[in-house]
Image (cartoon, grey):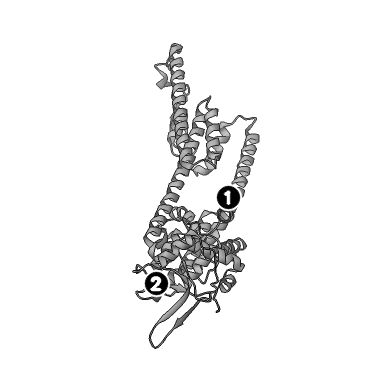
Amino acid sequence: MSTTSIATFRKVTPGILASAVLSQQDGRPLVTKQDLSLVLKRVAPALGIDGTSYHVLDILLGLVQAEDFKAGRRPVVAISNQRLSEYTSRHPRTVIRCLKRLVEAGILAYRDSPTGRRYVQKDNASGHIEAYGLDFTPACVNLESFRAAADAFQAQIKADQAARRELTRLARAIADLNEACEGLEGFRACAQTILEERHTLLGFRLERMRALYQDALESAASDHAAFSENMSSTGDIAVTSLFITNRPDSSKSNIRRTRPDGREINTKTDNGCAVELALEKEPCGDPAREQPKLRQAARPQGAGRDSHQETHQDTRRATQRDRQQGRAQGASQHGLLDDVSAGLVESACSELQAVISHRLTSWPAICEAAEEIRVLIGVSPSAYAQAVEQQGRYVAAACLAVVAEKALRDPEQISRPGGYFRAMIERAGEGRLHLARSLFGLAADRRS
């Protein structure tokens, strides 16, 4: 008598078992593919899905059919690990680990065939469909919980950004107090230490900074009160009275002088009223040409030429220094953003604004949403920081928006958003990036 042994495919974990239970439930919630895709991409950072795992999820969302989410159908993707390995340029074992992570997160479930192969078989006569592969049923069941987790994650990102701004603001306020009052060096050092701490929770650091700022304010106020009391206790300072020395008949000492144009003016020889009268008149020449003459007249005679040369040299040095500092940030942005406006970015990135729940109405708003966009498409913080350093905040944020919009519209077109973003920054540095053309194209596709 022959016996049949049952082969095992994988080691079952609690996460895999939970997804399998969800996939077998009756009455699967009816959702649309578009809604599911948007929620999964928003919640992916909160679930720890990034890198290759996010890339695999993006491919699976592009392959699943929208009709399979209707009643009586099952949203199954029948794609082999080898094909996913070719799509992602990763080893098949890496793909297997990424799929396991997606299953344990409650997004997918394994629906294995008797042989372990993934395929879809359709019967045209009866309309019956038999599908084996990767099932999106757990994601449909967990859709509302995923939506709440995505909203909480975005709210946490905004709260962290606000806390960092508050930390920086309070640290600068303490530095200003240190410049205005003596004896507050210790407060400034403590504020710098709190800013540089990375292992401490952000909320705890903010509470410490607020308490430190309050102590610095009280210390500065007490020092100011002691200084004012000391000044008031020293007594009055003797002041010598100034008397008018003009003679009563000084108005009779006027003499008449003739101007070059023939008109006569009255001047006083003893108290300088002619100078006051001249200053009340508006200058006839160009004020920009007259100011150097007035400054030259106000200088001592022996140091006039030397001080003028030193001032001119200092001005040239400051101008050159400012140009060198702003060349890296301003020069690249000026050329790339000549034909790009915030309104163009807003009209071109409609899908992105629906995902991040932001309106890209101005450049500050675009820069503020850059952190959320970076997390959404999986760009590393170091890559974005390097892009900001090379091309400036506006160009880097606009490139992020373009990459995210293209990835949301056609996931198969951009398989690696992080590499696409770095390539755009490199083309911008070489002068080969046509940012305005890309935005106009996206806006035109949306209208059509």
Q: Residue furthest bottom?
A: 125
Going by the numbered disc 2, the residue's amino acid type is Arg
Please name the residue that numbered disc 2 is placed on: 447
Name the residue tied to disc 1: 326
**Nearer the observer, 266 or 352:** 352
Q: Residues within 10 Å of mark 1 (few under 14, many from 20)?
A: few
Residue 401 locus on image (x, y percent): 48, 61
Contact check, label 1 and label 2, Cβ < 8 Å: no
Does 403 appear above or below 180?
below
Q: Earlier in the sequence, mark 1 or mark 2?
A: 1
Q: Report x, y in % for residue 86.
A: 59, 72
Residue 409 or residue 182, whichever sits in front: 409
Left or right of residue 408, residue 80 in this image: right
Circle count: 2
Q: Does residue 92 appear to the left or right of 210 in the view shown?
A: right
Q: Closer to the camera, 388 or 331?
A: 388
The image shows residue 135 at horizontal and vertical percentages of: 45, 70
Give the residue drawn at x 59%, y 46%: 322
The span from disc 1 to disc 2 (Cα, nearest Å) is: 38 Å
Q: Give the percent coordinates (x, y) of residue 339.
A: 49, 63
Q: Is residue 376 above or below residue 77?
A: above
Question: Could you tell me which residue is drawn at 60 percent across and 62 percent down?
Answer: 426
Residue at (48% x, 55% y) in the render: 370
Instruction: Report if residue 123 is visible in the image.
Output: yes
Q: Foreground mark, 1 or 2?
A: 2
Quadrant where the image shows the C terminus: bottom left
